[in-house]
Amino acid sequence: MTQKVYFASVRAHGEKDNKASRIRQLFDAAGFGALVQKDDLVAVKLHFGESGCDAYIRPPFVRQVVDKIKERGGKPFLTDAATLYSGSRHNAVDHAWTAVENGFDIAVTGAPIIIADGLKGTSTTHVDINQKHFKKVRIAADVVAADALFSLAHFKGHMQSGFGGAMKNVGMGAATPAGKRDQHGSKAISGDNCKGCGSCEKVCPEKAITMVNGRSKIELGRCIGCGECMTVCPNENIEFNWETEAEPFAEKMMEYTLGVLKNKKGKAGFMNFLLDISPECDCVPWSDAPIVPDIGIVASTDPVAIDKASFDLVNQQAGFAGTALKKSHAPGQDKFRDLWPKIDTAVQFRYAEKIGLGSADYTLVEI
């Protein structure tokens, strides 16, 4: 069944065309008002950005969605869950401070921050899904407890899934650390290009990497597959066994998305922000140069359709020279396969449709 995805371009010619106005227009066009009832506790799931990252969604944009929810009588709160890796969002205290430092203060956004899986990432609700990889999934308790859910995702590349959009923001982002570990399940592999800089050893949250005779050595029994070592290696020495693990990883993430949305039928809306489209996730403590120009914002009640539309919109652009893109600069070429050539991004759409998350068949409606 064809799903509608509403699109607002970044082009503007007046006050009614600015991004804040467009976000409010998208909220109405997508029918998001009908998802909120008076006194609903509404989770606004987003990524606050790692300390040092600056490509996350701008807090004033989030305020537009918050205000629209309030107009409907809802009670919105901004939320995320603890990270699997070490960093500035590994517990609720550091996470909240990072959010505020990145501009997500209540005075700016109009909503409080509630880290949905508690102080140390252990506040979990087990949700039955009975799928191929998981019978139950471990979801942040306050996301499950919320009456409605809005996903605001910064659309970008990702080293393990090829791209990250609405489904990753929900499936990976709303899982507890234990749930994130369930999804990763991969083991890092150190190759022959190690120069002995020690960057990987410093960031490994499980102390699974040590330097032996000037080269990195990974203790597979301790590795949790978070991928942090791969993001900091300056020599592209560390990888995962993508041939056997990339597809199961994507499928597991889709099953977690199904778990998050299980009790949100008719109560979930999705916005993807196609701005500052970076090659890597906002989990890294930096932001590389955008790979294509800013495009706009899309909204839908179907998480599969919105991600497919976002994916297509990015690939329709001419890529920027001098960025992480190697050769796929022409309009129509797959930018994400260029960035992460061993990742089959189609798995997300194919498996999401198979388990009933939504439809990759969409119509783009420009407002």
Image: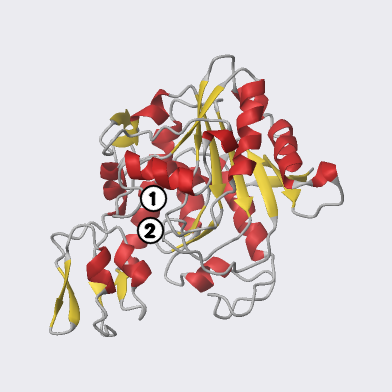
Residue 4, x across and y down, in percent = 69, 40
In the picture as drawn, the residue positioned furthest to the top comes out as: 38
Residue 310, x across and y down, in percent = 62, 53
Q: Is residue 198 above or below residue 169?
A: below
Crowdedness near tag 2: few (<14), some (14–19) or many (≥20) residues, C-alpha within 10 Å: some
Q: Is residue 208 above or below residue 13?
A: below
Quadrant in the rendering for residue 95: top left
Disc sitting over residue 119 in the figure:
none
Q: How is the image coloured?
A: secondary structure
Residue 162, x across and y down, in percent = 47, 62
Disc sitting over residue 247 in the figure:
2
Residue at mark 1? 251
Q: Nearer the viewer, residue 287 or 148?
A: 287
Q: Is residue 82 above or below residue 145?
A: below
Residue 109, x across and y down, in percent = 58, 36
- For the residues labelled 1 and 2, the Cα–Cα distance comes to 6 Å
Task: Find numbered disc 2 in the image and state the secondary structure of the residue it sits on.
Answer: helix
Q: Are marks 1 and 2 in contact (CB under 8 Å)?
A: yes
| Residue type for callout 2 | Glu
Q: Is residue 53 above or below residue 299?
A: below
